[in-house]
Image: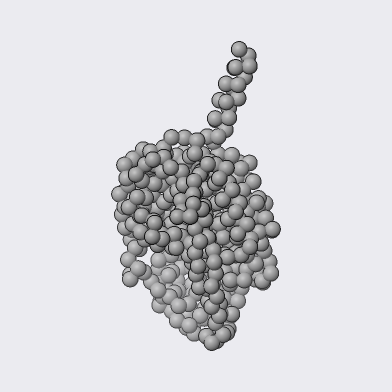
Amino acid sequence: MKTKITFLLLFFYSQIFSQSISIENIRKHISVLSNDSLEGRGTGSKGEEKAANYILQEFKKIGLKPMSDNNSYLKYFQFKQSSNPHGASEKDTTVKILNSKNVVGFLNNNSANTIIVGAHYDHLGFGEDQNSLDANPKGKIHNGADDNASGVAGVIEMARYFSTIKSNYNYLFLCFSGEELGLIGSKKFVDHADFNPAKINAMINMDMIGRLNDSTKKLMVYGVGTSPAFVNIVESSNSYFKLVLDSSGVGPSDHTSFYLKDIPVLHFFTGQHSDYHKPSDDIEKINFAGEQKVLEYIIEIIKKIDTQTKLEFRKTRDSNNENAPKFKVTLGIMPDYSFEGKGVKVDGVSDNKPAFNAGVKKGDVIIKLGNLDVTDMRTYMQGLADSKKGDTKELIVKRNGKNEILKVTF
C-alpha cells in the first residue's frame, strides 16, 4: 500500500510540474540560443542552423509532429539579399541568395481549426547586416538573449504545456528565421501553398518578452483590435501587469504577416531597452521570473480563446497600406514604444545618423519635426514622410522638462 501511495504522489506531482511554466526551462533554452557558440544566429548562418536543430530536437521531445510534405520539422526558403555599404554607389550593390528555414511543430487535437504560437529565432550574427545599433558592431557577436531567444524559449515552453492538456483546437508552434531582415520567414510561411488562413483561429506572437520591469510591470499587447473578442479576453485574463494595449495588427514583427492574411493576431512585448540590437543583449539581463509570468498570462488568454468558436477577424486602422506614410529618410532613433505621453520618446540614438549629429539624446521626447507637431508614432512617421534627403529641419525635443530646439539634416 505504501509503495502504491508513493507512486501516486510522484505521478501527481509530475503532472503538476508538467502543467506549469518552468523558470529553469526558460533559462536553459535562452542559455543555449544566446550562447556565443551560435554566433548571433544570423539568417542563413551556421549558428542559425544550430539554433534550428536545437528547437527541432525540443519539439521532438515534447511530442510535436512535423507538418511538412517531406515529414520534416523544417520548412526551407530562399531569398535575395542586397548589400550596399554606407556611401557606396548603386553599381557597388551586391546581391546574394540566402537559404534559411522555419521550424514547425504541430500538436494535433483533431480539430478543424488551429491556434498558432510563434516567435523568430534569428538575430544579427556579427552585426554585418547594418541592423546593429552598436557604434562599431562589426565582428561582435550579437547574441539576442531578449531578441528573440526569450520568445523562442516561450514557444518551446508553451508547446510543452499545451501538449499536457486537452484543447478544442490544434496548435502550430512556429519559429521563424529572417525576421531581422524584414519578416522574411513568416512571409514565406503564409505564402506557402499548404497554408490555409481560413483554418487559423488566431496567431500569438512573442518578440522580446524577457526584460519585464518588476517596478512598472508594464506589458505591451498589440493587435487587440484584430478581433472584437480580444480586448475583453486580454483584460479579463490579467491580474498582474500594467497593460499597454494597441489595436493595430501591423508592426515590426512576424504577427504582421498573419494579420495581412486576415487572421486575428496578438503580439506580446516587455519593452524596449538600451541593449536592443547591441552585443550587450545577453542572458545576464533576462528577467526569468518575469518571463514566466508573461507566459502564464498568455496561457490564460489562449485558454479563453480555446473555449470560443472561431474568432471574428477585424481590420485595424492602419491596414490600408496606401494611406500609410512612406518615407525615404531616417532619423536614426529607437522609439520607446511603451511611452504613453505626448510625442515620441527616444530610447536609443544610432551613431553618425541625423539624430546623433543634431544632438538628440536618449530620454528626449520629440514634439515637433519641421512644421509638424509630433503627438505620437503616426505623426512622427508623417514627419519623416514629408522629409527628403538633404533637408534641414527644426527639431524640438523636450529634455528634462524644457524644450530644446535642434537642427537636423537628413
Q: How many numbered discs?
A: 0
Q: Is residue 307 above or below residue 132?
A: above
Of residues 309 and 284, the one drawn nearer to the viewer in this rendering? 309
Which image quarter holds the N terminus? top right
What's the image's color scheme? one colour
Question: Along the horizontal axis of the image, is 92 left or right of 235?
Answer: right
Above or below 344: residue 8 = above
Question: Which residue is at 47% across, 41% downward?
Answer: 299
Q: Position of residue 339 (x, y in %)?
A: 48, 57
In this orientation, does residue 243 appear? Answer: no
Question: Residue sitting at 56 percent across and 57 percent down?
Answer: 121
Q: Residue at x 65, y 69 (%)?
A: 137
Q: Position of residue 112 (x, y in %)?
A: 34, 44
Q: Is residue 155 above or below residue 381?
A: above
Residue for point 45% across, 39% down? 300
Q: Is residue 254 visible?
A: yes
Query: Considering depth in this image, is 154 or 227 the residue closer to the camera?
Result: 154
The residue lying toward the viewer, choosing from 326 and 111, is: 111
The image shows residue 338 at horizontal and vertical percentages of: 49, 56
Coordinates of residue 25 in the picture (x, y in percent): 61, 42
In the current view of this chain or complex, which residue is farthest to the top?
1
